[in-house]
Amino acid sequence: MNTTSDPSPHRSLLVDLNIGAAAANNILGLPLNVYVMWLILAATRETLASDFFSLNLAMSEIVFALLCICFYVYVQFDYFGLKFLIFALGLLFTARPLFLCCICVEYYAAVVRPMLYLRLKPLRYKVACCCVVWVNALVFCIYSLCTFANTLYLYGFFIQNCIFFSVILFCCCSVLRALKRPGPGEKDREKKKSNAMKARAFKIILLILISLAVNFFLYMAVIPLQCCMMSDEFAIVFTISTSLALVTGFLQPLLYLHKAGKLFCFREL
């Protein structure tokens, strides 16, 4: 192997780290997301309507995993392997936070704005919203191909995900605050049942916030450091942070399975 053709001494390390993270994501996340997709599609129309955003999130994770498989196949060919990876990262950094944003906004509407939730409950509105998300994800995947290794690439995703993260944080905090308030005029039995449901929803929202922190906060916090770090050092730190975000594709299907009561070991939560 001619090492003089390698422009960076850390290049092989970064490629190996990406391959390892993508492989771990496929091993852990792909079967769970396929199972979640099967559960939703095999359920009733009401379940499909209520979990439509979760279905699309699982689909985006499956597409991302398949793109990573293409990355494995073409990793020996620098050009094709890099293009598959860049396109996949564009999907990771856009579709995942956008669908999580839709899920959290739906939680917010259901708990804090129930009249708005009932108005937007029909499936046609969710289909239209998901079409917008998929088009936006495709645009940002193309944006990734055009601006990769450019300052615009990092700061474009930084600004985008700051907006998504702010919306998600606002929705989750509003839901948590609303769940802590007691319901008016509840009897003792109804109050106990309501408190149990609120406690379960409270835990799910907290788990969503924790997974979001792991998914996005790390690489969002790293991007501003680009101006005060050497390029090779920044590449290593950024790759580590994005690899952690990449490998957490199994968290959301686990949350869905927990909510659906399919994780027997956590049914008591």
Image: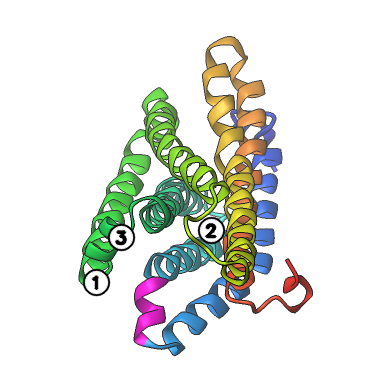
Q: Nearer the viewer, mark 1 or mark 3?
A: 3
Q: Amino acid at mark 1?
A: Pro
**Mark 2 element type:** helix
Q: In this orientation, does residue 222 appear?
A: yes
Callout 1 crowding tier (Cα within 10 Å): few <14, some 14–19, many ≥20 = few
Q: Quadrant of residue 134?
A: bottom left
Residue under the point 64% across and 66% down: 192
Callout 2 crowding tier (Cα within 10 Å): few <14, some 14–19, many ≥20 = many
Indicate whether residue 136 is drawn in magenta.
no
Q: Amino acid at mark 2?
A: Phe
Q: Are marks 1 and 3 in contact (CB under 8 Å)?
A: no
Q: Is residue 218 above or below residue 224?
A: below
- The label on residue 117 is 3
244 vs 62, left or right, is right
Q: How many marks?
A: 3
Q: Of 223 and 269, which appears nearest the observer?
A: 269
Q: Are marks 1 and 2 in contact (CB under 8 Å)?
A: no
Q: Position of residue 120 (x, y in %)?
A: 24, 63
Q: Quadrant of residue 189?
A: bottom right
Q: Label 2, on which residue?
A: 71
Residue under the point 24% across and 62% down: 131
- The label on residue 132 is none
- Magenta stretch? 45-51
